[in-house]
Structures are given as C-alpha cells and as structure tokens.
Image (cartoon, grey):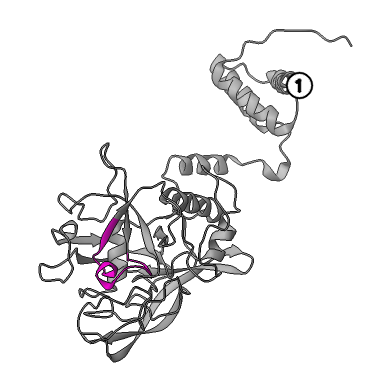
Amino acid sequence: MSNIQVSVRIPPQLYEKLVTHTNAVGLSKSKVISQALSQYLEAQTQEPSSIEDRISNIEKRLERLDIPPEKVQTTAEIDLNREKASQPSPVIVTPPLQTIIFETPNINETGTILERIKGEVKGFQEDLGEGIALDMIYIPEGTFLMGSSPTEAGAQISEYPQHPVTLEGFLMGKYPITQKQWEIVAQYPKVNKDLVIDPSTFKGSDRPVESISWEDAVEFCDRLCQHSQLPYQLPSEAQWEYGCRGGKNTPFYFGPTLTGELANYMGKRLYAGEGTSIYRQETTSVSAFYPNGFGLYDLHGNVWEWCADAWYPSYEEASTSGEPRSSSQKETRRVLRGGSWDEDAYHCRCASRYAYHPQGVGLSQIGFRVVCKVLSLDSHIN
C-alpha cells in the first residue's frame, strides 16, 4: 500500500496539546496524527456528529494515545481532576511536631539566677543530609509590644515608637544556622547566586556560620526551599523580636540584664548591676547557653542575625501584622538583630537594631537563622 501525503490544519490550542503529547510518548507529530485519524475514521461507522464534536473526539484520542492502561483515567477521574484544578493549590503540610522539654533561667539585676523554669514546646527536624538536621520550633500566635519602652536603658531612636504587633504562628530556627548546615545547603543546586562553602572566620561545625551577606542568606533560604518544598525564609523584624523575647517584655529574655554566663558578648561594659563579665573575642557553639521561653538559643550575642526587612530609622508607619518592610530607592540596607560576640549588652537587647548593606561580606559578627511559614499544622498541634 502506498502512503499518501496530506496537509492538516490544526488549531493552535490543539497543536500545543499535540506537541506536549509527542514529547511525552516519543513519537513524531505525523505518527501521532496518523494514529488519531485512523481511530477517528474507524469511529465514523457511527452516526455523524458536528464538527465541534469531531474535533473534541480527536483531542481526546490524542491525549489518550499510547498511555498505559493503568494510567488511563476514567471519566469520573477526569471530572475530579478538573474540579481540583479549579480550586486553590493544596497547602503543604509541615512534618509532625515533637515535644521538646527545656529549662530557662530567670535572673535579677545583678545577673543572679533566681529560678530555672521548665518549658515545653513543639518542633520538628528538617533532614539536610549527612546526618545533619535543622531544628525548627513552633512559635505560637500572639500580640506583643515591639520596640523599647521609654525607660529602657540604652534604647535608641530607631527603636521607637513602641507599638503592638499581632503575629500568626510560625516556625523559627532553634539555633542560628551552623557552619555544618551551611556547608551542606551551600552544595544544593544553585538558585540565583553562588555560595562559598566555608566562609567563616572562626571555625567549628556547631558554631554559627558568619562572614556572609544578606544576599547569601537569601540564597541559602531559596536552596533550602527547593530541597524541602517548605517556605523557608529570613524572619521579619517583628518575628525575630517576638521570638527573641520569648514571652517577656524585659530588655533581655532572661530578665533585666545579661552576663557572660548566659550569652557570648563583649562583657567589659556593664548594663545593670551585674559584675564583671567575660569577653571571649570569638564565636561559640550555638547551644552553649540557656534557651529563652520559646526554647530558642543564642539570640543575645554570638552573631548578629539578618532579617528580611529593609532598614527604616524608626517604626513610624510600621506594619502591625509583622510583615517585613520593603526597601525604598533611597535606602537599600537590611536589618540586623541580636548583637554579637564583639558588642556590649546594650546592643544585644531584644529591641536593639542595626543596619548593613545586603552585599556586605567579611564580617565575623554576622550570621542568621531561618523561619518557616505555618501552612498546615492543625493535625499536629494540640
């Protein structure tokens, strides 16, 4: 039998489906059209139908050609899939949360521990690979006063006006990102920019990663999102301060002052009635000290932590829902919080703020931690 060459005019919408199908089944477009027309002509023994019906039938055959029987959908399944497609995308469920028990101290103005309070929170571990996990703590929804009170020692103009902020629940890193965690994620597939695998000045797998820019931290979050399929990002200023306070309204989450037994900072300048403190002159392990009331570690000192927000010199017109503020044409610097091993207690307060350029690198005082939006925890939190 000789072959007959014909020209077929295909509507653009049908042609797109044809190309998609040929790529999927590995056949040429002419072969697929030939099969579809053969099936169509065989069906013409039935009653004639309208042109629209015929085109619709060919479309259906094109979509079903060479699909394994077990993958062929029934009419009910097709209708169900169409219904799903018209609905919003399903929420991503975070892993089941486990109970975490900890102990946090309460101190007086001399830095003396008055009591150790037992706490209980929920959290989960994100497996990064190589036996390393990222610990995330659930921070419950709530309202707090953001910024400094008029009587707080060391308060700066940028910490005013103090204002209420209401936050939805979210997940926050139990610790700053460590050098080992950075090393692993820095080898994940690139999203927007290259990352240096070992940028830190003070080496130690469980020390915080440092000497990275804001843009580096964002790239880390993007790669982690791509790996985990969860929405990791830098915290907003409001999320950071709310998490840092741990349910308290004192200058520090331990109470009215800070000591070298409770945090890694430059302890040569006293804040309240504490005695001479310790100046270690380098970073320390992220788990070296007590956690706060939310079970979070190392938010005072060790390394400054990048936030998502652009820098603004005050809280005038700041969001009351805790959303990060975007940068203006005049100001591109980003916010740092928490102080560092090379800052005195005044700069390590819960409300303390600082600004730095997003491309800035080479500072051993700057690191970060991540947060993750709560998408669906109904079945996990009681």
**Along the viewing direction, whichever of 334 and 81 lies nearer the viewer:** 334
Q: Which residues are magenta?
A: 338-354
Residue at the extreme right of the image, as rendered: 1
167 left or right of 372? left
Decide: few, some or many residues near mark 1? Use Cα within 10 Å; few <14, some 14-19, many ≥20. Answer: few
* Image quadrant where residue 156 sits: bottom left
Note whether residue 61 is visible: no
Q: Say which amino acid is labelled 1.
A: Lys
Horizontal side, residue 260 vs residue 209: left or right: left
Residue shown at 28%/52% (left/top)?
323
Query: What secondary structure characterizes most of the magenta part?
Result: loop
Foreground: 96 or 314? 314
Where does the C terminus fall, quadrant-wise? bottom left
Q: How many marks?
A: 1
Hey, which quadrant is residue 114 in on the image?
bottom left
**Disc 1, SS:** helix
Q: Is residue 41 above or below residue 281?
A: above
The answer to whether residue 258 is magenta is no
- The answer to whether residue 60 is above or below residue 203 is above
Question: Which residue is painted at 39% across and 71% down in the image?
Answer: 381
Residue named by callout 1: 31
- Residue 308, image x and y in percent? 35, 52
- Work out whether 52 lies above or below 344: above
Q: Quadrant of the N terminus?
A: top right
Q: Residue furthest bottom?
A: 114
Q: Left or right: where does residue 368 sit relative to residue 77?
A: left
Where residue 137 sits: x, y (%)? Answer: 41, 70
